[in-house]
Amino acid sequence: MSEADAETGTADSACPDVSRMRRHESDHDIPWALPVVVRRSKTHIARHVDVLEAAAEAVVTFLDDPRSQPEGEWHEALEHWRHGAIRKVVRRGDGKQFEDAAALGCVRVQRDSAHGFGPVDVLVLPPGPVQPLPRELKKLQVGGTEFPLGVSESDDGSADPATTSSATTGALVVIELTPAATLTTGKAAAQCGHAAQLAYEQMPDQTRAQWRAADFRVRVEFASDASWASAPPAPVRVVDAGFTEVNGPTETARARWSHP
């Protein structure tokens, strides 16, 4: 589970409705979250970085969907959620459990993994209270959502660095993850989802339109200590509240985009 604050800029009021996609400092008495579900196959598992990219793309695809816009069936729930923390909960499932969750009504993003890993399949469902949950979500696992980093290069199971990096090229949006914390795939996916959401909200109309035309593809990079420390200020900084996996408020992710 992930809870995050974020430093944000000024949103514009273009269509789709981004004018009210602002993060407020207050939270709801009953916390709400955006459910993200990742297929975790037991026989042909996806790769860590590919899951992160697909999760970020799925979050933005959900926000941009007509059902999330005014008069859409998800809009009221989305507006309520936006007036609290941008909390996202990443769950995993496979087989019938995954398809039962997909049948609830969602946005679904599917893409291939690199280096012979299995395909990625991600659902984003309309936000709702963290409790009680629909039966289809309640039976899905949250904790310990891990996917392999890359191809094992030794008996100790460590991954060959050449197989851990993103295979995505030419992405308009780049998300960097901090080197200061080791995050599970589920936690990192939530942070990438936060960063992608804030990029979508803050970028100019023309840039958003170009990103939409590219199916909201992102590239996720793992920053080194040196690159993280020396990078110029990013338009988006995600600061996690520190309730799970990190100790105290921690900057976990940054997002940048190129301009048309």
Image (tube, rainbow, N blue to C red):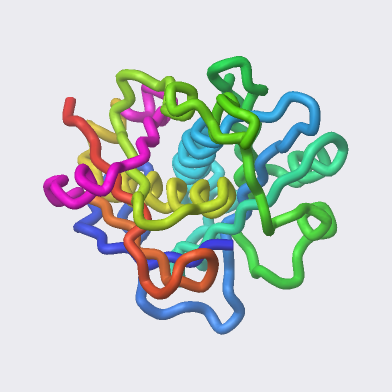
Give above or below for 95 relative to 37.
above
Which quarter of the figure has residue 67?
top right
* Residue 242 at x, y percent in the picture: 45, 71
* Residue 151 at x, y percent in the picture: 58, 24
Residue 135 placement, left or right of 162: right
The residue that appears at 51% across and 67% down in the rendered structure is: 80
* Residue 203 at x, y percent in the picture: 24, 43
* Magenta segment: 211-234
Residue 221 within the magenta-colored segment of the rendering = yes
Residue 207 placement, left or right of 42: left
Q: Nearer the viewer, residue 4 or 186?
A: 186
Residue 146 placement, left or right of 166: right
The residue that appears at 47% across and 53% down in the rendered structure is: 182
Which image quarter holds the C terminus?
A: top left
Residue 214 within the magenta-colored segment of the rendering = yes
Give above or below for 186 relative to 41.
below
Number of numbered discs visible in the structure rendering: 0
Q: Nearer the viewer, residue 97 or 29?
A: 97
* Residue 230 at x, y percent in the picture: 14, 47
Asked if one can make out residue 13 in the rendered structure from this viewpoint, the answer is no
Residue 5 placement, left or right of 14: right
Give above or below for 154 relative to 18.
above
Residue sticking out furthest to the bottom: 29
Give above or below for 129 relative to 47.
below
